[in-house]
Image (tube, rainbow, N blue to C red):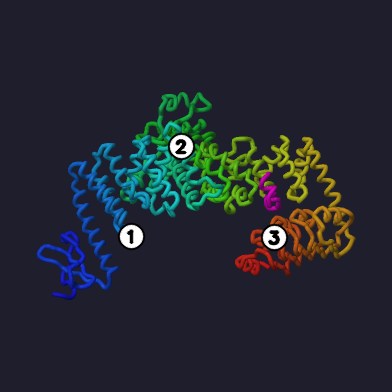
Amino acid sequence: PTGYMENSISYSAIEDVQLLSWENAPKYCLQLTIPGGTVLLQAANSYLRDQWFHSLQWKKKIYKYKKVLSNPGRWEVVLKEIRTLVDMALTSPLQDDSIHQAPLEIVSKLLSENNNLTTQDHESIIVAIAPLLENNHPPPDLCEFFCKHCRERPRSMVVIEVFTPVVQRILKHNMDFGKCPRLRLFTQEYILALNELNAGMEVVKKFIHSMHGPTGQCPHPRVLPNLVAVCLAAIYSCYEEFINSRDNSPSLKEIRNGCQQQCDRKPNLPLRLLHTSPDLVSQEATLTESRLKPVIVTSNEIHVEVERNNTANQKMTANVGNDSEPNLIDCLMVSPTCSTMSIELSAQADRILGCYVEILKMLSDYDDWRPALASLLQPIPFPKDNCLFLSSLTVFFRELKYVIQRFAEDPRQEVHSCLLSVRAGKDGWFQLYSPGGVACDDDGELFASMVHILMGSCYKTKKFLLSLAENKLGPCMLLALRGNQTMVEILCLMLEYNIIDNNDTQLQIISTLESTDVGKRMYEQLCDRQRELKELQRKGGPTRLTLPSKSTDADLARLLSSGSFGNLENLSLAFTNVTSACAEHLIKLPSLKQLNLWSTQFGDAGLRLLSEHLTMLQVLNLCETPVTDAGLLALSSMKSLCSLNMNSTKLSADTYEDLKVFL
């Protein structure tokens, strides 16, 4: 019979598959031997026939191994079959992801259904499937098996010899841990296993260096984002029980244990208040002691220590006779006047936190990784209004301070600009590590370093000074009183730009400046500049001025200091050597309406200053200047500007469209 088959043939029923090779045989045919006869399959060409042949052979063998390994007998035989299965996958000419994934899934199912294997059996199976893992991610169940092995046998040679290339491949090629969180968990457990070795963090450091490579630039763009994702997830897990104490969010542990559905999860266990001392529940002690002993709120992972006043204690002791003990949130709701609160991590959580914060420190030491690392850490979602949560991160903030210090010391704008908040209304590292912030523990030394680098870049603007005056004026004055030169400069700039409106506050700032030698000297220089500014802005002088070509910033400063230029409306600096530094002098020309900067080195930092001070500017020529989109966007606030020449600049099409809307 010929034509289409009336009934399908199951793969398990195929006894043999052969290529027809006898003389005068039909072209491009396969012979399938089944119970009761044979079937010939004819393809259109030899390539398609070979594809059918190898695919059918593969399917036939996979069914065989599934059947054999679903009912394991002696583990010596099972291990031999696994090795044969791996060899078959490696030698198959078929090019498909399922060729390597199918054996891994078979082994994964085998391991999940047999929990009585010895450690030696585990390691033998891992070594047997290692060749398949060189070019394939392990499936989720196999990741869980690897995690268990890392936890139970961290010093096993399998961790170093087999898992290392697997984790390296995950970090180099994984695009989204959200699609397979067990890959991230396996990477976390592997790094913790490395940390358990005798050399500890030195081994982890060598691993991080191997991921970066020996050159100054890491050739794998996914390594850093994946490492940061692993670190942040591990750090989050240290505080997870505390964070989830008020909701029913699934934890990483529950995800790891397979309880991802809401209905599958156990009820959330709140952090409980344990009355560990009779003194804490004694009414007599409540009446006699003005301060209470700390009450320990404990859970499996975290110990929370809370001090309450007498009123709170009376409310708490009134509930002692109840059957249910109050939880942590009840304690805090009863006593909103908590004076201190600290989170004490368990020893295991403390080791995890120390390990992964140390990795973040290592990452910050690589110059090529620092810009991307700063950008990745900038939008960490710390809730601004949750002081309880922020207070729980004291250890994390203290350990992370080294990373923030590296950002503050980096002269590149794309690095230290990430110290600021990612958007308005959300605190950034600058706010968290400033005096009064939950992370500040050094009387403002890091805060002063951050202000210094930001002011030295392109942040010497009214907006930045206004934010400091509104939120951090007290710390600035205190640090200036202690002789910090950066804070002295900040206070002088606040006076120079008229940031402070209140006369009493201005007098207090002046008194602060005059209390130190450096402050007195800088305040005297400010007064001299103010006198020169008044003379410069006095009505009179020319209305048009053109500097000779090749003039410098110093030449412009010398010229403007020679007389009054209060009437100057048109200034041409075309084809001179002036830079953004001359903006400090240009913003002192109150009547300036036309400014020609054609073919100068005037850049983005200067544009930001002009946009804030020269509100009357109408015509601006930036042809052949090194300005970029970042500086040009600042011009959108100049409502009087009616003519802007940006020919031969690095202007992008998107920025051009944005400027058309504003100007």
**Residue 397 picture quarter:** top right
Q: Does residue 333 appear anywhere in the picture?
A: no
* Mark sitting earlier along the chain (1/3): 1
> Which residue shows up at 88% across the image and 59% down it?
539
Q: Main secondary structure of the magenta part?
A: helix
Identify the residue at the far front of this view: 23
Q: Which residue is mark 2?
A: 203
> Which residue shows up at 62% across the image and 68% down it?
657
Mark 1 neighbour density, 10 Å: few (under 14) some (14–19) many (20 or more): few
Taking the image as shown, residue 392 lies to the left or right of residue 568, namely left
The amino acid type, in three-letter code, at marker 1 is Asp
The amino acid type, in three-letter code, at marker 3 is Pro
* The disc label shown at residue 451, or none: none
Q: Position of residue 451 (x, y in %)?
A: 67, 44
**Residue 631 picture quarter:** bottom right
Q: Position of residue 11 (x, y in %)?
A: 19, 61
Q: Which residue is mark 3?
A: 626
State which mark lies toward you, 1 or 3: 1
**Residue 486 picture quarter:** top right
* Mark sitting earlier along the chain (1/2): 1
| First to last magenta residue range | 452-466
Q: Which residue is mark 1?
A: 96
Local secondary structure at mark 2: helix
> Which residue shows up at 26% across the image and 68% down it?
49
Q: CA distance from mark 1 to mark 2?
A: 36 Å
Q: Does residue 274 appear anywhere in the picture?
A: yes
Q: Position of residue 492 (x, y in %)?
A: 76, 45
Q: Position of residue 64 (x, y in %)?
A: 20, 54
Q: CA distance from mark 3 to mark 2?
A: 46 Å
